[in-house]
Image (tube, helix red, strand yellow):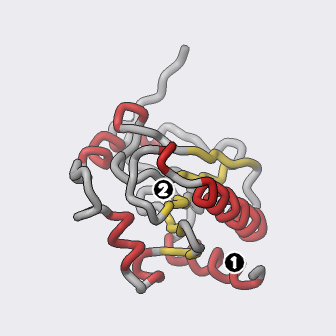
Amino acid sequence: MERLFSPWRSEYIGSFSKKPNDEGCLFCAAAKDKNDPRRLILLRRKYCFVMMNLYPYNSGHVMVVPYTHTSDFGRLSAEEHADVMTAAARLIEALNKTMKPQGFNFGANLGRVAGAGIDQHIHFHLVPRWNGDTNFMPTLADTKLVSESMQSTYKKLKKALAAKK
């Protein structure tokens, strides 16, 4: 089995508080803040919101975040689970329209040992993928290449989401 290492992730993962409540939680603070462009929030729904990842694996990497502050997947209601899926579907459609990816990774890292950088508030990653989008820059040069500015991606996705309400 081959392994690729990305040591930059350790710094990112270690940069978050381990507080067990919503005080200081990045996602709870973003949910309460009404300045969506500043927080890079693309979509607000009844039970969840979607925001861009400040440390993206690829251009267009977003997170679907339930408003409920919990790390327990089973604590989310059926309505919350459904809203997360509906939000993900909306973003997949917008990403397909604006960025034309060839595939997606969608999922959650449940717990710190599973790779969750913020393990106290469950969230779901949606990462657009293109053939050949991985390279050795993170391993060899401690650098991740992202091909488009966050603001440019944000504007394109907001426009695509507004066109389909």
Circle 1 crowding by C-alpha within 10 Å: few under 14, some 14–19, many from 20: some
User: What's under tag 2, amino acid-wise?
Assistant: Pro
Where does the image place residue 22, in percent across and percent down from the top left? 29, 61
Q: Is residue 117 left or right of residue 80?
A: left
Report if the CB atoms under discs 2 and 1 are less than 8 Å apart: no
Q: Which residue is mark 1?
A: 161
Q: Who's the residue at 23% across and 48% down the image?
A: 18
- SS at badge 1: helix
Q: Earlier in the sequence, mark 2 or mark 1?
A: 2
Q: Is residue 123 left or right of residue 126?
A: left
Tell which of 118 and 129 is nearer to you.
118
Distance of mark 2 from mark 1, alpha carbons? 20 Å
Q: Who's the residue at 67% across and 42% down the image?
A: 132
Q: Is residue 113 left or right of residue 19?
A: right
User: What's under tag 1, amino acid-wise?
Assistant: Leu
Q: Who's the residue at 65% across and 77% down the image?
A: 156
Q: Is residue 93 left or right of residue 75?
A: right
Above or below 35: residue 128: above
Above or below 25: residue 19: above
Q: Which residue is mark 2?
A: 56
Where does the image place residue 35, in percent across and percent down from the top left? 41, 85
- For the N terminus, the quadrant is top right
Residue 80 location, quadrant? bottom right
